[in-house]
Image: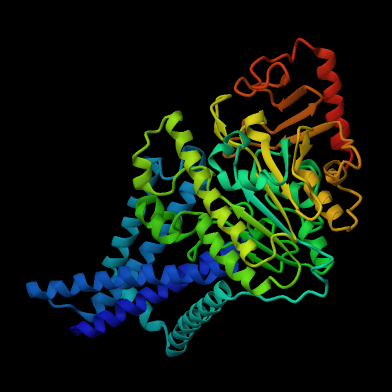
Amino acid sequence: MEIKPIANVKLALFSGMIIGSLHGTIDVLIRIMARSFEWFELYQTLLMSLIIFILIFLIVSILIELLRVFGIKIIKKAVSVFYFSTAVAILLLFYVSIFVNNFLLSNFGFWNNLEFNLITIIIVIIIYIFLLSNGNLIFNFMLLINNKAKNLIRNYIFLVTFFIISSSLIDLYTLNHVISFKSNIQSEVYPNVVILLVDALRPDHLLYAPNINKLASNSVMFDNAISSSSLSLLSQSSIFTGRYPSHHGAVLKRQILNQKELTLAEILKENGYNTAGFIGGVYTKAKYGMGQGFITYKDRLDFFEYVHTFDKFSLRAVLVTFFPISKSLLRQDGESKAEDVNKQVFRWLENNKEHPFFMFVDYIDPHTPYGTEEEFKKNYPNNIINLIKLYDTEISYVDHNLGKLLDKLEELGIKNNTIIIILADHGEEFYEHGYLGHGNTLYQEAIHVPLIISYQKELKAQKIQKRVETIDILPTILDLIRIEAPQNIDGISLFPMMKNEGNYTKEYALSELYGRAGIDETEEQIAILYENWKLITVKPDIEKIPSGLYNLKTDPKEQINLYDVYTEKRDFLRKYIINIKRNT
């Protein structure tokens, strides 16, 4: 019996919905078992699978209808067998290819071993031909599916569709809803606390940040602040816990801040503060443990977000591999620009300005890659001078938007009663020691960061040359607002030094790096700064990044390695490292 065009399209639509629901369900279950997902990804995964496979089968149905133009009869039985066989072949090709490339050939590069992929394709084609050539067998099998089974399939498709629609509505609501929080503490007693973190901002590039410099001129400016790491996850976890990476444990091999760690946001929340975080980057997302203690935490990079989740069995991974243009459609830029972060910040401030709050704002813009617009990138050839120009342009951009936030605090009349801290989580390397970016080494360009603390009620403007650490921020804030700091932290308060009422007693600064971003050449790098000396230990020691001892007074750019010259100083500092790491 010849199938009518409308019936053909309906059958194609139904086939696409079946295979889309099945594929999406498998993807969702794998993400859940891998414990690597955010809730909105579940419905978006199902939605993407449905849309892609429905489109595929609808296109096929149109091609089948075109055969009528040439006078070919379209038999219902043949079309049913064709759709069934195509669905089986697509799923088989997808999962076998994923398994072969992501697991068997993972060491050879994704989709790069043509021989194995060709063998996979040939095998699937043979199976596909077998299914098509045994149409009677397949059709009889399809007839065995009774009405109950068909109803079950239809009900499941309905449930999947209902889940997608209801979840998307909830998602849209949560994305646009602003929580208003009424605190039981008084703003006259407790000031607001605002941390503005500019990712990868080097202090020697503040020339391109006039708004930051303007605030610094009326604030306490620390000229020698050291980050606890050159990677965001490690350093920001240290900022929020006041503990070194080896103590809080959030490192590349365990990419999450343990729930047992007590964070600044949790402490302030327990003491009545409204807490909110607005995130532009990836590794400050809540799923890495960074949202602990925040009542509001806006960390969605974009609506269709699949950044840094378990994607090995995802349809998106295949689409992006073979059709790179789909990346911009499915995930956009992978970060939120400063002006987009500010939009959320301003809305929140309008609703929560009346009560004491702690607000953390993470600006990602100076982070690599520099310049997110492709047209803008084309104007700058890929050489070091122009890369630095791009980097400085990003600093100017983020400074402009940071200035708008400071103006907003002034406009709302709350700036004078707000502790404002501006800092970076790490620096940036421009081949001073052979690397670009960060997370590669612990040289000064990677760990020396700006640190500015403004609180007009209590702090006078001054520049402090004493070496301090970013892990000192937590105890400093708690000291400023008269809350007792935890006993197990590594940082110490800067408040007595800023008030000229005491000394900063710490003799050293420590920075750590475990593994390297994307490369496992080194397992551990530790830098300790003591007086004018700096020791960097590297395990295993490699030619590109050797262990080193440097005199920062005579060699501030760390070009002369004295590791084998001053052995007593080297061994002394090495023991210092051991003692620090032992004291958890």
Q: Seen in the image, is 389 located left or right of residue 263?
A: left
Whether residue 483 can be seen here: yes
Q: How many marks?
A: 0
Residue nearest the viewer, comparing 88 with 129 = 88
Pinpoint residue 53: horizontal percent, then vertical percent: 37, 69
Locate residue 57: give its quadrant. bottom left
Instruction: Name the one closer to the observer, 340 or 188.
Output: 188
Location of residue 154 in the rendering, given as x and y in whole percent from the top left corner: 44, 85
- In the picture, measured across the screen, residue 275 lies left or right of residue 364, that is right
Q: Identify the residue at image location x=76%, y=53%.
A: 455
Residue 338 location in percent, x, y? 53, 55
Give the residue displayed 40% in from the left and 41% down from the top. 112
Write down the quadrant of residue 252 in the picture. top right
Q: Residue at x 51, y 76 (%)?
A: 168
- Which quarter shows the N terminus? bottom left
User: By what rule are the colours in the image chosen?
Assistant: rainbow
Whether residue 312 can be seen here: no
Front residue of 107/461: it is 461
Of 4 and 543, nearer the camera is 543
Q: x, y percentage for residue 171?
A: 54, 74
